[in-house]
Image: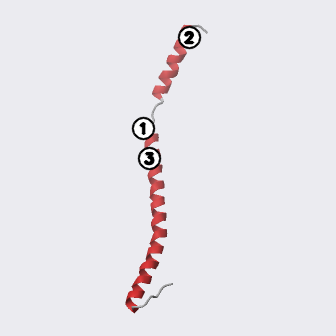
Amino acid sequence: MNIADRFLAARVWIATRVSLRGERGTTAVEYGIVAVCIAAVIVIAVSFLGASTNHNLDCGGRSIAAQTPQCP
């Protein structure tokens, strides 16, 4: 394979890569997946922390209403 053939092959390869370079949609999908994962982590954290916080506030409210400690 002479230099002209190699040059032509390289030019064809580069032209093909440039024409197939539609990565804009791929990037948007990746950002979407990251956003969904972050949202899922937030929902899970809020649900676990919400249950704990609800118990603590309920315990505190009962203690204030009875004016004696109601929780262990």
Residue 51's disc number = none
Q: Position of residue 61 (x, y in %)?
A: 39, 84
Q: Inspect the image, locate mark 3, and give the three-letter code of the amino acid beneath it.
A: Tyr
- Which SS class for mark 1? helix
Residue at the disc numbered 3 = 31
Secondary structure under badge 2?
helix
Q: Provide the secondary structure element on which disc 3 rests.
A: helix
Q: Label 2 amino acid?
A: Asp
**Between 56 and 34, which is closer to the camera in this rendering?**
56
Disc 1 to disc 2, C-alpha distance: 33 Å
Q: Residue at x 49, y 26 (%)?
A: 17
Mark 1 highlights which residue?
24
Nearer-N-terminus badge (1/2): 2
Q: What residue is disc 2 on?
A: 5
How many neighbours does mark 3 have within 10 angstroms: few (below 14), some (14-19), or many (20 or more)? few
Image spot of residue 47 (x, y percent): 47, 69
Q: Residue 36 placed where, x, y %?
A: 46, 54
Q: Quadrant of residue 59?
A: bottom left
